[in-house]
Image: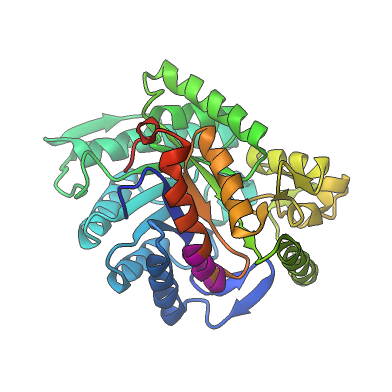
Amino acid sequence: MSSHPLEFIGFLAHQAASESQSPVGPLVDPAFVGAFAQTQEHAGFDRALIAYHSGAPDGLQIAAYATQQTRRLGVLVAHRPGVVAPTVAARQLATLDHFSGGRAAVNIITGGNDAEQQRDGDFLSHDERYARTDEYLTLMKQAWTAKTPFDFNGRFYQVRDYRPNVQPLQKPHLPIFFSGSSVAAVQVAAKHADVFMMWGEPLAGIAEQIANVRAAAAVQGRAEALRFSLSIRPILGATEAEAWARAERIREAAAKRLSRTPLTLVQGGVPQNVGSRRLLDFAAQGEVLDSCLWTGIARLTGAVAGTAATTGVGGNTTALVGTPDQVADALLAYHRIGISTFLLRGFDPLEDAVAYGRELLPRIRARVPAELPVTAFAPL
């Protein structure tokens, strides 16, 4: 991790795969995880996100393994409240923070799909889940910071005589990333988040979300405490034509893969979570938005055409397509409206991480001091 005002986050999968690439190797592939983590560290990423899914290997163990294969790379562990007690999660994450030398962060994902939640035994409604997340984070942060034993009496959690012995190396606690576009999500983020994460919408959509979250945070007295993150999929080429040709190849490969193995993140043809619906609404406006924001993968879904035969590719699928300079320009446009963290993930994960480290990250880092006063954004 670095002290530069911009933070770059990669993505650490448990095996080689993407929307356009069928999985290669075992489901839990330690050799791939180690090599992928080392590649992203060498490329200059500050952290790598480890996702959460009910059918995926345990992210905490992947994170712990990755930190032992690297020296500097931070880990951002996606964590779903409600699966374990918040006091247990507090100790798990604090322990990881110590073993990693203060390189741990947590990405709170409350969950936007009922069927996926129910696979882990969670049958609360959407708004109830966010009410629980609010309480969960309140208790978890108290476990991280309390100086003496305490009781906690909430709607979802009750604790008696909790002993806060295991606390993070980072103070006051490890960074809390948060995502969610619903009204309920924004309210919880405003109260608890250090970094609010968004998928790759056009500039106007991102500016709208930043304004909404900042307004909610101001009510909590935290308007200046939040930073904002954009998740995007850069597709680079030596020329603009080469980049767009590659984007088309990725779309064709993704269409073939999705025809064989559709994603099941929607019910009744429309995604349940607000973020995916927003992204699909933008995709319906056109294949290329702003200067080079490509919605081609999202537009593979039937939801764009209003049918029920959707594959559910409404999440982190939008891409910035072009030469390294063109993509850097597009990312800096987001920076100028308030983004200080970028989560960059390729459709060819390992190869793209190398390319980003060689062609993209140095360009952006070199230009930021000239683009905006760095005092506008607080580093980790």
Residue 345 is situated, as x and y percent measured from the top left of the image, at: 55, 60
Where the C terminus falls, by quadrant? top left
Q: How many marks?
A: 0
Give the dominant element type of the magenta stretch: helix, strand or loop. Answer: helix
Considering only vertical position in the picture, is 335 above or below 293? above
Residue at 22 percent across and 38 percent down: it is 172
Question: Which colouring convention does the figure follow?
Answer: rainbow
Q: Residue furthest top?
A: 219
Residue at 35 percent across and 32 percent down: it is 375
Residue at 40 percent across and 35 percent down: it is 193
Report if residue 227 lies within the magenta region. Answer: no
Direction from residue 242 to residue 338 in the image, left or right: left
- Residue 124 visible in the shown view: no
Direction from residue 87 to residue 36 in the image, left or right: right
Q: State the image quarter where residue 65 is shown.
A: bottom left
Residue 138 is situated, as x and y percent measured from the top left of the image, at: 33, 33
Report if residue 356 lies within the magenta region. Answer: yes
- Residue 331 visible in the shown view: yes
Q: State the image quarter where residue 208 is shown.
A: top right
Towards the viewer: 128 or 336 = 336
Towards the viewer: 218 or 111 = 218
The magenta span reads 350-358
Q: Residue furthest left?
A: 148
Direction from residue 42 to residue 339 in the image, left or right: right
Residue at 66 percent across and 73 percent down: it is 21
Considering only vertical position in the picture, is 239 above or below 3? below
Residue 300 is situated, as x and y percent measured from the top left of the image, at: 80, 57
Where the N terminus falls, by quadrant? bottom left
Direction from residue 322 to residue 130 in the image, left or right: left
Considering only vertical position in the picture, is 162 above or below 359? above
Q: Residue furthest front?
A: 370
Residue 372 is situated, as x and y percent measured from the top left of the image, at: 45, 34
